[in-house]
Image (spheres, coloured by chain):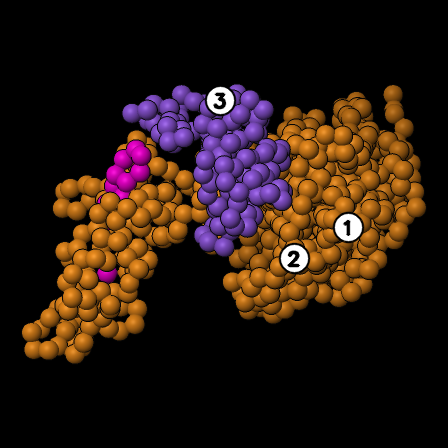
Amino acid sequence: MNVPLTKGAVEALCKGLDVDKPVLQLLNIRQISNASGPPRFRLMMSDGQHSLTSCLLATQLNYLSDENLLVPNCVCLLKKTVNNTLADGRRVVVVMDMDILKSAEEAGGKIGNPTPYNTDGSFTGQAPMKASPMKASPMKASPMKASPMKASPMKASPMKASAIKASPSKGLTVKVSPMKASPMKANSASPGSSAKVIPIASLNPYQSKWTIRARVTNKSSIRTWSNSRGEGKLFSFEIVDESGEIRITAFNKEVDKFFSLVEQGKVYYISKATLKPANKQYTTLKNDYEMTLHAHSSIVPCDDNQSIPTVHCDFVPIAELENRDKDAIIDVIGICKSAEDVSRITTKNSREVSKRALSIIDQTGKVVTVTLWGEEAENFDGSTQPVVAIKGARLSDFGGRSLSALFSSTVMVNPDIPQAFRLRAWYDREGFAINSQSLTETRSAGTGLNVNWKTLSDIKNEDMGHGEKAQYFSCVATVLYIRKENCLYQACPSADCNKKVIDQQNGLYRCEKCNREFPNFKYRLLLSANLADFGDNQWVTCFQETAEALLGHSAETLGHLRDTDEAAFDEVFQKANFTTHIFKNRVKLETYNDESRVKVTVMEVQPVDHREYSRRLLQNIYKLAR
Amino acid sequence: MASLLDASKPRINCSMLSQHIGRGVCFVGRVEKVHPTGKTFSVSDGEGKSATVELNEPLEEELSGIVEVIGMVSSKGVITSTTYNILREDKGIPFDLELYNEALKVIHDFPQYYPFEVAASG
C-alpha cells in the first residue's frame, strides 16, 4: 500500500516555508566527510513531484544511517526540520527528527517521477554539490580529486567553507560563509520568518535569521581602549528572557548607534547580530555564546514585556562571602550603612580614577566593603542609607573579603525587587542597631594586602616558611637586642647597587657587580636583631630602610659615629632596645651548604597603633569567648 | 588614706560602682560639670553614664577632658577621691573612652586572666 507523499513539500521547503510533517521518499543518501566531528549525511528527498538535494541529516540521526534504516527509496516522515539560509542565499533543510514509515522494499521503488527542484546551480545526481559562487564548469570531479587540497572540504564545500585552504584550486572563489564546521548543530526551532521570536537559549552562530525579545538587565558604560592595535570604544549589556541570558557588546560605530537607545530594564526585539563563543573572562553569564552588534543589527523597543523576567539576580548573603573563592563574580544586596567620600586615585597606568568605598549590611548581620569606580562612584549618594544591589561584582580577599564593582557590574540603588523591600523593612526594624562585624578589616595605613597577624610562637608552631613560597606575616613585637658588630658594611656608591665593595687598600673600593672601582663607598645597615613577644623570641634581619627606622638614624650618621664617638654609637643601640613596633616580615626556609634554617627578614617597621591593636585584641577575645 | 593607695584599685565604670562600695577604685571618665565650690564634679564613662566625684580639697585648676580618679566608693555611690590624673588631650594619642570601656568589660568578664588583686597584694 502506498503511503502518499506530501506533494508540494519540496517546493515549499525550497522556498523556505515551513511544512508540517511532510512525508517524503529518500532517493539517495551520501556521506559527506567531515574534517572534524561526526560524519554528516546528505539526503536527496522526493515528494513525488520534485526532489530536493540540499537536505542534511542532523548528526543525532546518524544512527538511522548506521543501522541501515535509511536506504534509498524508503519513505520517511519528517517530524522536525530546520530551514537555514546560507550567506550566499541558498537554502538547506536540516532534518532534526524523522520516522521511517516504510522501508525501501515496502515502498517498492521510486514513487512518482520527481524532478530536481534546485534553485542553486546544476545538480548532477552523483557528483557532490558545488557551491554556486564557484564557476561550475571547470570544477567538475577532477580538480576535486586531483587537487592537493584535502578532498573532503571541497565536497562539503557549501558547508565547510572555512576548512578550505583557499588558493590551490583554480578559479575557485568560495565565499566563506559564516557557517563553520557543522552548520546544523542540533538546535531548536526554525527561524523561518524573521518575525518569529526565538528563545535566547537557542541562539547559536549557525543561524543567521533570528529575532529575540528580551529585557536589558545590565548595561555598562562606554569604555575606550587604546592598545598596540589601535583604539576604540565599546559598551556591553546583558539581556534576559524566559529561557536564559546572553551578553551583547557593541563596538565603535555601533556604540554611537545603540548606546542611547538601550536602557536598562526595558525590553527590546533584537535581530541580526553576530554570535560567537563567549569569552568567559569578561562575563559570568550562563551562555556558551555572546553577541556582537554590527552595522545591520536591529534593536527595536518592545512594549509587550509581561512575560520577560526582570533582573536575574542570585544574591549571596554577606556572611557567606567568606566561603566563596577570591575573584568570584557575585551578586549582592544590602543596605548601605555608610559611604566614604569619593576619592581620586592614580592607577598603575597613570590614569586617574574616582573611587568610593561603601559598607553594606544585610540580614546576616555582616558588613562588607564595596568599592565603586568612576562615574558610579561620583554619583553615588549613601546619605539615605539606600538599598544597594550589585550584580556581577568581583569578590576579592582585600582586607579579608571585599567587593569591587567591575566595568561590567550593575549597581542598582533602591531597586524595585522584593529582596530590596525585605531588606529595607528588616533594617528599619532592627538592622540599624546591629553592631555588625565587617568582613573587610580596617585597612592599616599603606598596606593594601590582607594583613596576616601572627605571634612569634606561631613561626615555629605553624612551620612557617617551610613551603615553596615565602610567607609574609605581621606581628607586634619588642626589640630585645640588636647586634652592634657587623651592623654596617661598605657598599657600592652607584645608585641601585648595594653590593659590598672590596677595600683594595689603595684608597679604591672595587664593586664586583658593577665591575668598577670607586674612591668612596656608602655605608649600609644590615642588622641582626632579636625580637620578642609573650610567646617566643626570634632573630630577624633588617636591611637599610627598616634598620634606619628602628635605630632612628641613617647609615651614614651611624658609620660616622662609629668612627668618632663610640659611646654615642652604643647609645643609639641602647635606645632601640625594648621599643615595641609592628613588624611586617617575610619568613622562608633557606638552605646554605647542607644546612636549612628558617630565616626571617623584616620588610617594614611601623609604630604600634594602639587603638587599632586594642580593637583587634578585643575582637580576638570575643571570638575566643564564643 | 595612704592604705588606700597600697591596696588594689580595680578599674571600673558606672555600672560597676555599686559592686565596689567601700572599696578603693580607679575611675576614668570625661569631666562633665564642675561644682562652683570646686569640691565636687561629675564625670561620664565610656557608656555615657555619670558619676559624682568628691574631693578633699577644692580644685585649684581648671578641670576638663578625661581624668583618671583614684578614690573610694561611698555608700551613696559617690567616689571620694584621694588623687586624680588629667589625661591631657594635647599630648600623645587621644584617649578612646569607648575602647577603654570595652577593655574594662573584658577585664571584668574574665577576672581569671586578669589577676590584679594577687599582684597588688604581693
Quadrant in the rendering for residue A233: bottom right
- Magenta-highlighted residues: A525-538
* Count of residue discs: 3
The residue under label 2 is which amino acid type?
Val
Quadrant position of the N terminus of chain A in the picture: top right
Kindly indicate whether the residue at mark 3 contacts the one at mark 2 (C-beta within 8 angstroms).
no
Q: Residue under circle 1?
A: A208
Residue at 75%, 43% (x, y): give it: A386
Q: Position of residue A321 (x, y in %)?
A: 58, 35
Nearest to the observer: residue A72 or residue A250 = A250
Badge 2: how crowded within 10 Å, few (<14), some, or many (20+)?
A: some
Q: Position of residue A77 (x, y in %)?
A: 82, 29
Residue at 69%, 28% (x, y): give it: A64
Q: Residue under circle 3?
A: B22
Nearest to the observer: residue B122 or residue A477 = B122
Subunit of label 3: B
Quadrant in the rendering for residue A121: bottom right
Q: In what element is the residue under mark 3?
A: loop
Chain A color in figure? orange
Q: CA distance from mark 2 to mark 3?
A: 55 Å
Q: Is residue A16 above or below residue A262?
A: above
Magenta-colored stretch includes residue A533: yes
